[in-house]
Amino acid sequence: MDIILVPGFWLDASSWEKVSPALEAAGHRPHPLTLPGMESVDADRSGIGLRDHIDAVVAAIDALDNKVVLVGHSGGGAIIHGALDSRPDRVERAVYVDSGPLGEGGVINDELPADGDDVPLPPWEAFEDADLVDLDDGLREAFRARAIPQPRGVAYDQQHLQDDRRYDVPATVIACEFPSSLLQEWIQGGHPFVAELSRMRDVEYMDLPTGHWPQFTKPAELARAILAAVDRTATS
């Protein structure tokens, strides 16, 4: 199975380096992406918006012969959902890692402080305690050293969707910061945060208790969770 791995904010393809080997060992073909403007700290991020990142994922799908599994971490969940909307017939499953599908008109996070065209990684004090579970001092130092500013437009732009067939594609939510049972309570209560997720017709939930960056804090467990989702896709 071709597995396209889309990183969250401030990260490039290398953020999947401790996850990809287990996917390869299981016989799959991981394709970790570095999205436009994320090539380096010095890359030009002017004019790059959410659609540019979605289009980059769509191009990766189109470059492959077979159907794919999309995996999106954090803000990457919104990006893979936009790509799913563009290519619903080419996606076997969408896997949202501590994230979920972003609906029409939503934004990933327009409250993140921007510096011109850049959204730098905020200081750790700006994050919730739940975000930072298991992210020890060494991992924090390594993360900050590798962090690349996010294009402002990706964080602030509205999502635009058009194909309701996206709701028929199987989805997996890997819940890290809080249990999946809470997500399901929100769905039952009609919370707007999960409005798009509530419309997905075939969703499975998996719990991986840790902070917001499981590819750093629990990479082996994250790889196993992705493989479990892929294996169920192959046998469904």
Image (spheres, rainbow, N blue to C red):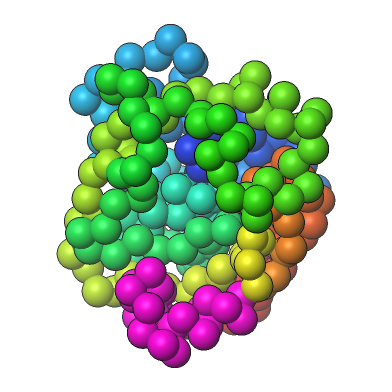
Q: Is residue 143 above or below residue 129?
A: above
Q: State the image coordinates of residue 41 (x, y, percent, origin top left).
A: 48, 14
Query: How many discs appear?
Result: 0
3 or 143, which lies in front? Answer: 143
Q: Is residue 109 visible?
A: yes
Q: Residue at x 39, y 43 (%)?
A: 57
Give residue 116's position: percent from left, percent from top.
Answer: 28, 20
Magenta region's main secondary structure?
Answer: helix
Residue 36: quadrant of the picture: top left
Name the quarter where the N terminus is drawn. Answer: bottom right
Asked whether, in this view, residue 64 is left or right of residue 36, the answer is right
Magenta-span inclusion, residue 192 = yes
* Residue in view at x 52 percent, y 83 percent: 184
Say which of 49 and 22 sits in front. Answer: 49
Q: Residue furthest top?
A: 42
Q: Is residue 184 left or right of residue 234?
A: left
* Along the line of sight, the residue nearer the viewer: 185 or 25: 185
Q: Is residue 83 magenta?
A: no
At 71% from the left edge and 31% from the top edge, which residue is drawn? 140
Furthest toward the bottom, the residue is 188
Where does residue 28 sit, x and y in percent of width and height?
A: 68, 52
Residue extent of the magenta highlight? 180-205
Q: Is residue 28 visible?
A: no
Q: Quadrant of the C terminus?
A: bottom right
Q: Is residue 83 above or below residue 101?
A: above
Tell me what residue is drawn at x 73 percent, y 50 percent.
133
Q: Nearer the viewer, residue 232 or 171?
A: 171
Residue 234 screen position, x and y as percent? 62, 71
Vertical relation: 134 (above or below) 92: above
